[in-house]
Image (tube, grey):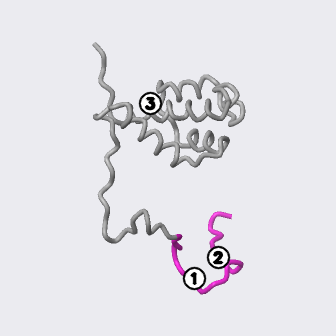
Amino acid sequence: MTRVKTPAESFNAAVGRQLRAEIAAAGSSIAAMAREIGFARSALDNYVTGKRAIPVPVVYAVGAALGVAPHVILSRAEERLGAEGDRHASVIPFPSRPDVPGRRQNDAEVAFDSPLPHDADTDDLYD
């Protein structure tokens, strides 16, 4: 009896397929990429084949090595799911909220305004 994948497992597999495609499009291999990012080849192979859940640092490391932003890889993986026709695995978008700027209003934000110059910052709690 075949177990049905959860939406998260399907998305993870799509991210793995997208990572494999990005690596191949760059003219690299799983083994070469694993060496470049400092992971074991077998671990990277397990991630791109969907055998193991892909940690965010792996997506980030592969993206950085290829010059592709991690959010672009994830977006392409989501498009891949739609193109493959897996209607049960689509990512459910969060509903927009009126107090949060939309995509077209993606301005840089500051956590807080401070009258202190940066060199007078007192954020030394962990030194």
The answer to whether 53 appears left or right of 88 in the picture is right
What's under tag 2, amino acid-wise? Thr
Question: Where is 94 relative to 12, above or below?
Answer: below
Q: Secondary structure at mark 1?
A: loop
Q: Earlier in the sequence, mark 2 or mark 1?
A: 1
The boundaries of the magenta stretch are 108-127
Of badges 3 and 2, the one in the foreground is: 3
Q: Earlier in the sequence, mark 3 or mark 2?
A: 3
Q: Nearer the viewer, residue 124 or 40?
A: 40
| Rendering quarter of residue 127 | bottom right
What's under tag 1, amino acid-wise? Ser
Majority secondary structure of magenta residues: loop
Q: Nearer the viewer, residue 27 or 117?
A: 27
Of badges 2 and 1, the one in the foreground is: 1
Q: Secondary structure at mark 2?
A: loop
Question: Where is 44 relative to 124, above or below?
Answer: above
Q: Earlier in the sequence, mark 1 or mark 3?
A: 3
Q: Secondary structure at mark 3?
A: helix
Residue occupied by mark 2 = 122
Is 109 part of what is drawn in magenta? yes
The answer to whether 77 appears left or right of 19 in the picture is left
Question: Where is 84 relative to 75, above or below?
Answer: above
Residue occupied by mark 1 = 114
CA gap between label 3 and label 2 equals 45 Å
What's under tag 3, amino acid-wise? Ala
**Label 3 crowd bin: few (<14), some (14–19), many (20+), radius 10 Å:** many
Residue occupied by mark 3 = 13
